[in-house]
C-alpha cells in the first residue's frame, strides 16, 4: 500500500517539475473528521509566487489554504495516509487514479482528460456584472472549477449580483462619484462573499462599471489595474478568527492589494476616513453596533 502511495506522489512531483500538472482531487474520505468530504487542488499565482490551492469541502463550509509545491506534496502524502481512499491526478500527459483499500492500494494510468493546462491567473475577461470565473467564487464554493454556479448556490449568486448593483448605483448617484480614491469598511463581513465581489467589481471592471473612481482614473491613464488597486481600499471586519483567516488566504490572489480582513468586534472598531460603511442586517446586536 505504501509503495503505491509513493508512486502516486512521485507522479505528482514529476507533473509539477515538468509543468504538466492540471489539478488533483482527493475523495472517499474515511478518516477521523466526520465533516470532511473531499479536497480539490489547483495551481494559483499569488503575490508570493506559484502555489497550490487546497479547497477542503466540509458539510457546511469550504476552507481554502495555499501551499508552496514542496509543502503541498507533503500535505497530500499525509492526507492519503490519513483517511482518503481515492486520489485522482490530472496532467496533460496522463491521468493517474489511486484507489486505497483496507489491505492494499492500486494505481492506474489512463489517457489525459485535459489537453492543456488551465490558467493559474485570477484575471478573467469580464462578461457579467460579476465574473463567475473569479477565483474567490470558486474558493468560497459558489462556482465550480470551470466557472459554473453551483445549483445549491444560485440564491447566493443572485444576492451577490444584486448587492453590487445596488451599491454601484448608490455611489454613482452620490458625491463619491468623482472621487479618485475610496476607503470602504464592511462590518460583519462573515465569509466575505459580498466584500470580495464589490472589491472585484470596483477594481476589475471597465464597462459595465461607468463613472466614479474607474472613469476618473480611466480618463487619466489607459490602464486601470495598478492605480485602482491602490485607490480602492476595502476592509472586512469580522470577529470570528476562522473566517478572517479564510478570507485573508483567498485575498492573496494578485490584484487584491487593497483588500484585507481584520478580526475585531464591530462596536470596538475605530474608523478613520471611511467613505462607505457597509453593514447588512445581522443577528444579536451586530446591526445596532454597526449603526
Image: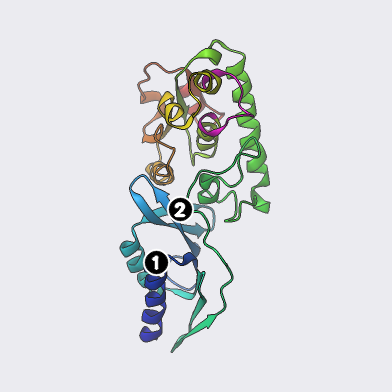
Whether residues under marks 1 and 2 lie with C-beta atoms below 8 angstroms apart, the answer is: no
Which corner quadrant of the image does residue 74 belong to? Answer: bottom left
Q: Position of residue 154 (x, y in %)?
A: 67, 46
The answer to which of marks 1 and 2 sits earlier in the sequence is: 1
C-alpha separation, residue under disc 1 versus residue under disc 2: 23 Å
Q: Which residue is mark 2?
A: 63
Along the line of sight, which residue is nearer the eye, 78 or 60? 78
Q: How many marks?
A: 2
Q: Residue at x 50, y 77 (%)?
A: 96
Q: Position of residue 81 (x, y in %)?
A: 38, 76
Q: Position of residue 43 (x, y in %)?
A: 44, 57
Determine whether 106 is above or below 87 in the image.
Answer: below
- In the orientation shown, which residue stands out farthest toward the front? 222
Q: Secondary structure at mark 2?
A: strand
Please indicate whether residue 41 sits to the left or right of residue 77 in the image: right
Give yes or no for residue 266 being in the magenta stretch.
no
Along the line of sight, which residue is nearer the eye, 291 or 254? 254
Give yes or no for residue 212 being in the magenta stretch.
yes
Identify the disc placed on residue 288. Answer: none
Q: Which residue is mark 1?
A: 16
Which corner quadrant of the image does residue 252 belong to? Answer: top left
Determine whether 49 is above or below 10 in the image.
Answer: above
- In the orientation shown, which residue stands out farthest toward the bottom? 103
Determine whether 41 is above or below 185 in the image.
Answer: below
Q: Secondary structure at mark 1?
A: helix
Along the line of sight, which residue is nearer the eye, 267 or 3? 3
Please report the bounds of the magenta region as a residue range. Answer: 202-213
Please indicate whether residue 73 sits to the left or right of residue 172 in the image: left
Amino acid at each position: 500500500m505504501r509503495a503505491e502511495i509513493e508512486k502516486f506522489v512521485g507522479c505528482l512531483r514529476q507533473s509539477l517539475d515538468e509543468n504538466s500538472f492540471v489539478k488533483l482531487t482527493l475523495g472517499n474520505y474515511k478518516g477521523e473528521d466526520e465533516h470532511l468530504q473531499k479536497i480539490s487542488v489547483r495551481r494559483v499565482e499569488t503575490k508570493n509566487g506559484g502555489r497550490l490551492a487546497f479547497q477542503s469541502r466540509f458539510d457546511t463550509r469550504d476552507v481554502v489554504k495555499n501551499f508552496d509545491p514542496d509543502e503541498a506534496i507533503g500535505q497530500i502524502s499525509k492526507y492519503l495516509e490519513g483517511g482518503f481512499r481515492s486520489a485522482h491526478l490530472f496532467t496533460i500527459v496522463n491521468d493517474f487514479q489511486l484507489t486505497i483499500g483496507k489491505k492494499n492500494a492500486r494505481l492506474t494510468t489512463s489517457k489525459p482528460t485535459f489537453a492543456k493546462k488551465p490558467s493559474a491567473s485570477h484575471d478573467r475577461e469580464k462578461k457579467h456584472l460579476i465574473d463567475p470565473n473569479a477565483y474567490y467564487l470558486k474558493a468560497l464554493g459558489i462556482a465550480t472549477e470551470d466557472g459554473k454556479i453551483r445549483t445549491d448556490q444560485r440564491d447566493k449568486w443572485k444576492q451577490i449580483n444584486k448587492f453590487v448593483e445596488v451599491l454601484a448605483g448608490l455611489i454613482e448617484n452620490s458625491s463619491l462619484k468623482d472621487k479618485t480614491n475610496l476607503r470602504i469598511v464592511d462590518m460583519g463581513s462573515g465569509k466575505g462573499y459580498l466584500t470580495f465581489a464589490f472589491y472585484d467589481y470596483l477594481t476589475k471592471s471597465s464597462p459595465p462599471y461607468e463613472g466614479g473612481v474607474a472613469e476618473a482614473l480611466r480618463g487619466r491613464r489607459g490602464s486601470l489595474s495598478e492605480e485602482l488597486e491602490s485607490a480602492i481600499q476595502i476592509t472586512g471586519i469580522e470577529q470570528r478568527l476562522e473566517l478572517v483567516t479564510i478570507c485573508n488566504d483567498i485575498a492573496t490572489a494578485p490584484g487584491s492589494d487593497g483588500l484585507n480582513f481584520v478580526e475585531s468586534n464591530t462596536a470596538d472598531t475605530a474608523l478613520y476616513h471611511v467613505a462607505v460603511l457597509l453593514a447588512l442586517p445581522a443577528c444579536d446586536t451586530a446591526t445596532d453596533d454597526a449603526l
